[in-house]
Image (cartoon, rainbow, N blue to C red):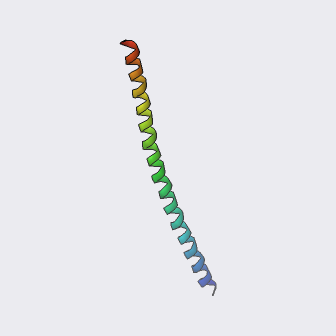
């Protein structure tokens, strides 16, 4: 009887670990998308500043 409860608890913990792993994978995917978005915004800002500098210098 005791070993059956222990096995059930171990199974429940394994299921919980799988759920947490899946959630972490979703979070990591979201962070990758945010990183790509942030990189794009930084590049856009650099190009904007460069464009403004060129405009000011060659007036």
- Residue 8 picture location, percent across and down: 58, 79
Residue reaching furthest to the front: 59
State the residue in front, 9 or 42.
42
State which quarter of the image contains the C terminus. top left
Picture residue at 47% right of the left edge, 51% below the top? 30
Name the outermost residue toward the bottom.
1
Q: Considering only vertical position in the picture, is 47 above or below 28?
A: above
Picture quadrant where residue 52 is located: top left
Identify which residue, 53 or 16, lies in the foreground: 53
Q: Is residue 31 left or right of residue 13?
A: left
Tally the marks.
0
Residue at 44 percent across and 30 percent down: it is 45
Left or right placement of residue 10 versus residue 34 in this view: right
Give residue 48's quadrant in the image: top left
| Residue at far right of view | 2
Considering depth in this image, is 12 or 50 the residue closer to the camera? Answer: 50
Q: Where residue 31 sits: x, y (%)?
A: 48, 48
Against 35, is 1 above or below?
A: below
On the image, the x and y values in percent for residue 50 come to 39, 23
Q: Residue at x 47, y 45 (%)?
A: 34
The quadrant in which the N terminus is found is: bottom right
Q: Residue at x 42, y 28 (%)?
A: 46
Q: Is residue 31 above or below residue 59?
A: below
x, y (%) of residue 11? Answer: 55, 76
């Amino acid at each position: 009887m005791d070993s059956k409860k222990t096995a059930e608890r171990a199974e429940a913990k394994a299921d919980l670990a799988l759920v947490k792993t899946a959630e972490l994978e979703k979070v990591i995917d979201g962070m990758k998308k945010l990183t790509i978005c942030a990189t794009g915004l930084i590049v856009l800002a650099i190009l904007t500043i460069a464009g403004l500098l060129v405009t000011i210098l060659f007036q």
